[in-house]
Amino acid sequence: MSKVSLVVDGYLVQAEPGETLLDAARRAGVEVPTLCFHERTGTRGLCRLCVVEVEGWGRPVPACATEAQPNLVVRTETEALAALRRVVLELLALETDLSHDAGTQTLLKRYAAHPQRWSAPLADRREREPVHDNPFFVRDYAKCYTCRRCIDACGEGVQGVWAYGTTGRGHAAVPGTPLDLPLPETPCVFCGNCLQVCPTGALVPLEELSLAEGGLS
Amino acid sequence: MDSAPLLLPMLDAALAARGYLEPADIEAAAREARLPLARAWEAVRFYPRYRTEPPEKRFLLVDDPVVRARDFAQLWAELEDAAPRAEAHADTVYSQGLEAVGPALVIEEGARWRVFAPVQAADLQALAMGKLPPHELEALPPELARGGGDLFEPPDPLPEFSGADALISAVREAGLRGLGGALFPAWRKLEAVRAEAADAKYVVVNGDESEPGNFKDRWLMEHNPRLVWAGAALAARAVGASEIIFYVRGEYAAARARVEAARAELEASGYFEELKTQTFRGGGLYVCGEESALLESIEGRRAEPRLKPPYPAQAGLFDRPTLVNNVETLAHLAWIAAHGAEAYRQRLPKLFSISGDVARPGVYELPLGTPLAGALEAAGGDPEDLQAVLLGGAAGTFLRLPEAAELPLDFAAPQLSGDAVGPGALVAFTGDRDLWAVAEGIAAFFAHESCGKCFPCSLGTPHLHAAVARRERGPQTEELFLALEQGSLCGLGQAAPWAVRSLIRRFEGVRT
Ligand code: SF4
Ligand code: SF4
Ligand code: SF4
Ligand code: FES
């Protein structure tokens, strides 16, 4: 199949058929900011940080979930996009403990985010207690931004185990276990896939935690 | 239908038996539906009716744009005061399609709802003494359809199928559009599904009308379901579908019972021939009306909008080509099949749900293009007395009167983002009503209904609500509007700021 030619931020790009706008942008040397996207789990389209403008289309589209098409003219950094990303990042930082999430912190700087301008947090996400229910890792959902990578990694994306699902709606949506059971009572096989894909530090191995806290107890 | 039984109806059966779900009910339903337990649990923790504890008795004040403009605060204070004395919990529930007959109260015991409307402050006080309000309402009064209309009449005789080409070209000539709000040309959807080759195709009737201000689909489901079924059957034949699923808003018990009774009658009379049909109880959330979220919920998942493409016409229910049409659209389709495109074009009927400050709130069939003032006058409203109309519903905009009086109610291009006839709600407000209170109710509604899939909406709608509650306006609020409108995955988050933004721009004369 022939390559797909399109323009990203003024550069002509030859994308492979089936590639996304995110891939195409990378070919042009442009790193579109992403939060939820993950190659291996197939997670995409949720955070909307990667939205880009396509000439002639209405709303911006998520680069991670939009296939490259011939002759598109794509812009990945405009004032409007920066403003949109800034608001999403600010609200995210306001409502979530991002202290262990270096990636998002870098983006907060890149977009000159000031979460404080939205006054106080509204959701009670930050008050969530860490779940210690297994000998291997902690689930600290005060740090979770509900990207659902862990759910995809465990469920249909990778493992096919289904130890997790999404619970709640709106800002209260968060991963949980079936019937709220402790992980050892779910089908979990402690493969560690979910830890590997978690971007926020919400899922941390116990060893790392105790090391960070100054040695084994 | 794929061979495994559907999850939600099984959960509902357990719910009806006990009033709440035990772990064993959920495990059994997951097993039967051949879903991982985590999937079934997602559904339980998503749809509000699946409680896992014995439910307490609840008094629910219906929160809609009409009551918000009037005495919501006072009624709520009365209810909060009375409920504990009747050993009940006071809460609110969003619009139940009762804008024309409210204010309304729901009394919930176990899985059972009783609706009372209209209620007054004194009725709520009397709850404390164990007295029920005087007017119980099972369904919308039939006479709420006012002034007569073609779509109010049951089909007699039932329209016959004249072949796919004939039907689709009649729909095309008639100029029929999707009347759930999207206004997409109906014939294109029919053609798209028809063109697909697949082992199974579905027609899904979207009867999830949940947008505050709208109740015309509710009326049709309660009082003319045969016409809608006829439209669905014709559409199914035209696209080559083998099964119709009629999705009725979860809270609408009478609508569901009547849709099901009409189905059973039509089936017994042989009208459906080889077509399989079923009535499905919806999830009970606004987002279920988004067509792909609706399909997810039939499949037993969280009603979260899918990323598109693919569109339902290509990969819909169980990945099969699926025609999803709104209740009113299919009623029109049946009428067109019976009377022809020419007769339809002469009438161009459209249903409007008219409520608020008009003398005769109700469902009106008016020709498309009727000026706004004409529609209000038909319902006994005096455009001179009115300051504003909420056009479309919660996902709509405020228009200012008298400036907008001559605006034709048709499908023409919008002037402000969000201006559209949409599903056809008109909520009228006289000069003494507080439009900010209405906007605040709408913002609360969106924050409550956000499904939680995408970040801009799940994070942004609570902050939008807070900003509207503080009557905030200014550049920072506008940034939030844009993040929601431009960043959200589906129409819910995109439309959340429209009403308040139109209020700021049109009534305050400032461009934020
Ligand atoms: S460790 Fe358990 S929960 Fe995490 S991916 Fe593996 S099986 Fe799933
Ligand atoms: S726990 Fe980590 S991977 Fe899972 S949703 Fe939260 S942030 Fe994403
Ligand atoms: S816009 Fe809101 S309702 Fe729609 S997908 Fe996003 S979170 Fe869900
Ligand atoms: S990275 Fe594309 S939507 Fe999250």
Image (cartoon, coloured by chain):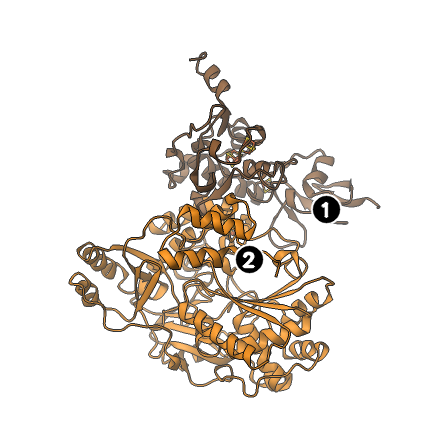
Chain colours: A brown, B orange
* Disc marking residue B5: 2
Query: SS class of the residue under badge 2?
Result: loop
**From the viewer's perspective, is A62 left or right of A180?**
right
Q: Which percent across, then down, holds residue B83? A: 21, 57
Q: Amino acid at mark 1?
A: Ala
Choose top left, top right, bottom left or bottom right for residue B319. bottom right
Instruction: Compute the Cα span from label 2 to label 1.
Output: 38 Å
Q: Which percent across, then down, holds residue B149? A: 48, 84
Determine whether B313 is above or below B164 in the image.
Answer: above
Name, please, the residue furthest toward the left.
Answer: B129
Determine whether B508 is above or below A151 in the image.
Answer: below
Q: How many marks?
A: 2
Query: Looking at the image, which is closer to me, B178 or B508?
Result: B178
What chain is tagged by disc 1? A
What chain is tagged by disc 2? B
Determine whether B295 is above or below B230 in the image.
Answer: above
**From the viewer's perspective, is B82 left or right of A212?**
left
Choose top left, top right, bottom left or bottom right for residue B82. bottom left
* Disc marking residue A68: 1
In the image, what residue occupies the spot 56% across and 58% down?
B295
In the image, what residue occupies the spot 63% across and 83% down?
B160
**From the viewer's perspective, is A36 left or right of A56?**
left
Q: Amino acid at mark 2?
A: Pro
**Is residue B368 at all visible to an observer of this figure?**
no
Name, please, the residue furthest toward the top.
Answer: A215
Q: Which percent across, then down, holds residue B498? A: 47, 57
Q: Residues within 10 Å of mark 2 (few under 14, many from 20)?
A: some
In the image, what residue occupies the spot 50% across and 84% down?
B154
